[in-house]
């Protein structure tokens, strides 16, 4: 499986935008970029995913580099409820298996 | 949105007991379900992939005779931890997806915290 690299932790102030980076330099042409987040003592929650084009949904935006070797999850206005571990995962087009790394622990402060 | 229900949310039992965990997709048909295990302060580790009507595929190092998986319908998969021991204590999480591979997201249950005394 192609690997992803994320910072271990990030901090943000409430109501500020947050940009969570992810490097995936060995991504293949059929790999989708998925983002999930996990709050304490809960199962992961789907955030967003994309292939080549930038994606927007009600939770976040996903900006994908032109060469697809990196991507950025954008939370437009962080709230305390966004404090979680964010996982960037590549999923092959033909199989939906996910391999979780260590993710980025996002702290949001007042 | 797609909802996955996992039951029970917490189990405490004695060593040697077998424990069954259910995972249901409530508003969609899940052709594939996944079972993960997460130890404290660690990431999720995939244990097995189950497809409706066929045998589960286990990840390397996961004992298939200890962790029995059944995916008898498009909305239900079960994980049975047989003869559980304290080292099996962990947070077990299921997820489900529809056909489409990486094009489709996975939807996760809220997890089952298993504590073996």
Image (spheres, rainbow, N blue to C red):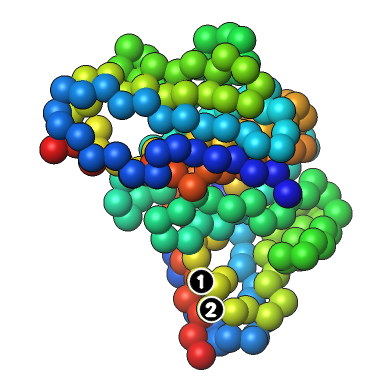
- Of the numbered discs in the image, which one, if any, rests on residue A83? 1
Measured in 3D between alpha carbons, the distance from the residue under mark 1 to the one under mark 2, in whole angstroms, is 6 Å
Residue placed farthest to the right in the image? A53
Is disc 2 on the same chain as disc 1?
yes
The x, y position of residue A5, in whole percent, is 54, 55
Residue drawn at (61%, 68%) of the image: A20
Q: Position of residue A8 (x, y in %)?
A: 45, 64
Task: Choose top left, top right, bottom left or bottom right for residue A75.
Answer: bottom right
Point 64% across, 51% down: residue: A46
Name the chain under label 1.
Answer: A
Q: What residue is shown at x 50% (from left), y 57% (from top)?
A: A38
Residue toward you, A71 or B68: B68
Question: Residue B115 got which mark?
Answer: none
**Mark 2 crowdedness (10 Å alpha carbons): few <14, some 14-19, many ≥20:** some
Q: Which residue is more in the foreground, B97 or A105?
A: B97
Quarter that holds the C terminus of chain B: top left
SS class of the residue under badge 2? helix
User: Residue A30: x and y, percent?
Assistant: 76, 35
Foreground of the two, A34 or B29: B29
- Residue A37 visible at all: yes
Instruction: State whether residue B18 is above or below residue A103.
Output: above
Mark 1 secondary-structure assignment? loop
Chain to which the residue tagged by mark 2 belongs: A
Q: Position of residue A79 (x, y in %)?
A: 59, 79
Give the residue at mark 2.
Answer: A80
Q: Quadrant of residue B3?
A: top right
Residue drawn at (31%, 26%) of the image: B19
Residues under numbered marks 1 and 2 in contact, where contact means CB atoms less than 8 Å apart? yes
- Residue A31 visible? The answer is no
- Vertical placement of residue A86 versus A44, above or below: below
User: On the picture, is A56 further left or further right than A3?
Assistant: right
**Count of labels shown?**
2
């Amino acid at each position: 499986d192609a690997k992803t690299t994320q910072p271990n932790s990030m901090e943000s102030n409430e109501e500020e935008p947050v940009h969570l980076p992810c490097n995936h330099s060995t991504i293949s042409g059929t790999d989708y970029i998925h983002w999930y987040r996990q709050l304490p003592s809960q199962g992961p929650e789907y955030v967003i995913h994309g292939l080549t084009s930038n994606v927007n949904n009600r939770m976040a935006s996903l900006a994908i580099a032109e060469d697809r070797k990196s991507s950025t999850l954008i939370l437009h206005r962080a709230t305390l409820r966004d404090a979680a571990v964010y996982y960037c995962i590549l999923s092959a087009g033909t199989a939906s298996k996910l391999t979780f790394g260590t993710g980025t622990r996002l702290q949001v402060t007042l | 949105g797609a909802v996955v229900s996992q039951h029970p949310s917490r189990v405490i039992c004695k060593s040697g007991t077998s424990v069954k965990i259910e995972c249901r997709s409530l508003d969609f048909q899940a052709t594939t379900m996944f079972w993960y295990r997460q130890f404290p302060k660690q990431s999720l580790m995939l244990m097995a992939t189950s497809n409706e009507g066929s045998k589960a595929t286990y990840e390397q190092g996961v004992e298939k005779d200890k962790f029995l998986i059944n995916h008898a319908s498009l909305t239900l998969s079960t994980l049975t931890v047989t003869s559980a021991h304290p080292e099996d204590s962990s947070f077990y999480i299921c997820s489900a997806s529809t056909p489409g591979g990486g094009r489709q997201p996975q939807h996760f249950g809220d997890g089952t915290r298993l504590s073996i005394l």
